[in-house]
Image (cartoon, helix red, strand yellow):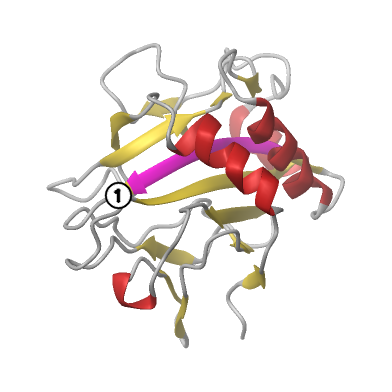
């Protein structure tokens, strides 16, 4: 069973330049994103969030390149899916994520991860690992490559190795089948999040970077 799909050079060189200048090198990073809030102790990483679940729309400060790439991601998946996550995250040596899933049930949610660093060497690590009951595999970190996978598959974004002096950065997208999302959060999808129960992943109550939970 193949756990993920790969799309090399999913963005053009010019789009990569735009991602670097408008996102990765832009002083918008905050610290506090965790892969799994149920694991203690938590080891957070850096993040930028561009999608607000209170409005079901992009944040006001969302760069145009993020809107463009989010739309491209949506164009590759079924029409009855809607965007629920568009963000950037980054980790440095010693700051690894934890194995986690982005959605509890298979077949109704798709995650996309775009590798965004300017350059990368194999010995720097940074792969995304996947595991199921029968398989264990990895996607090598290669700039401009997109990987997509069922959001219910357990995965982890590995931090860079000691020899790497760079920050491992990605863009992450997630879309959920509309009926599955409504079943979980109510009929306020796309227009309001008043009935949505959320878990805050950052100390600020105004932070839109949240996880949807039952």
In the image, what residue occupies the spot 66% across and 72% down?
5
Q: Nearer the viewer, residue 199 or 13?
A: 13
213 in relation to 27, above or below: below
Rendered location of residue 114, percent (x, y)? 57, 54
> Residue 97 falls in which quadrant of the image?
bottom left
Q: Is residue 116 left or right of residue 18?
A: left
Rendered location of residue 80, percent (x, y)? 84, 44
Residue 24 in the magenta stretch? The answer is no
- Please state the extent of the stretch shown in magenta in the rendering: 83-90
> Residue 175 falls in which quadrant of the image?
top right
Q: Nearer the viewer, residue 4 or 65?
A: 65
Question: Please, which residue is most extreme toward the right here?
Answer: 79
Secondary structure at numbered mark 1: strand
Q: Main secondary structure of the magenta part?
A: strand
Residue of label 1? 91
Can residue 213 be seen by looking at this rendering?
A: no
> Residue 45 falls in which quadrant of the image?
top left
Q: Is residue 41 left or right of residue 51?
A: left
Mark 1 surroundings: few (<14), some (14-19) or many (≥20) residues within 10 A: many
Rendered location of residue 81, percent (x, y)? 77, 44
Rendered location of residue 143, percent (x, y)? 53, 61
Q: Is residue 193 left or right of residue 203?
A: right
Q: In the picture, which quadrant includes the N terminus?
A: bottom right
């Amino acid at each position: 069973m193949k756990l993920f799909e790969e799309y090399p050079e999913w963005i053009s060189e010019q789009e990569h330049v735009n991602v670097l200048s408008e996102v990765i090198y832009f002083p918008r990073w905050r610290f506090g994103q965790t892969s799994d809030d149920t694991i203690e102790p938590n080891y957070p990483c850096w993040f930028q969030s561009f999608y607000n679940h209170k409005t079901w729309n992009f944040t006001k400060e969302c760069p145009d390149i993020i809107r463009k790439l989010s739309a491209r991601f949506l164009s590759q998946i079924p029409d009855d899916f809607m965007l629920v996550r568009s963000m950037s995250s980054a980790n440095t040596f010693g700051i690894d994520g934890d194995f986690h899933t982005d959605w509890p049930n298979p077949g109704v949610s798709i995650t996309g991860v775009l590798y965004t660093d300017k350059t990368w060497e194999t010995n720097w690590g940074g792969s995304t690992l996947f595991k199921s009951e029968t398989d264990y595999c990895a996607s090598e970190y290669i700039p401009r490559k997109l990987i997509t996978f069922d959001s219910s598959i357990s995965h982890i974004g590995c931090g860079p190795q000691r020899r790497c002096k760079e920050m491992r950065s990605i863009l992450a997208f997630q879309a959920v089948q509309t009926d599955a999302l409504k079943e979980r959060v109510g009929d306020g999808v796309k227009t309001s999040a008043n009935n949505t129960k959320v878990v805050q992943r950052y100390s600020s109550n105004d932070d839109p970077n949240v996880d949807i939970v039952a």
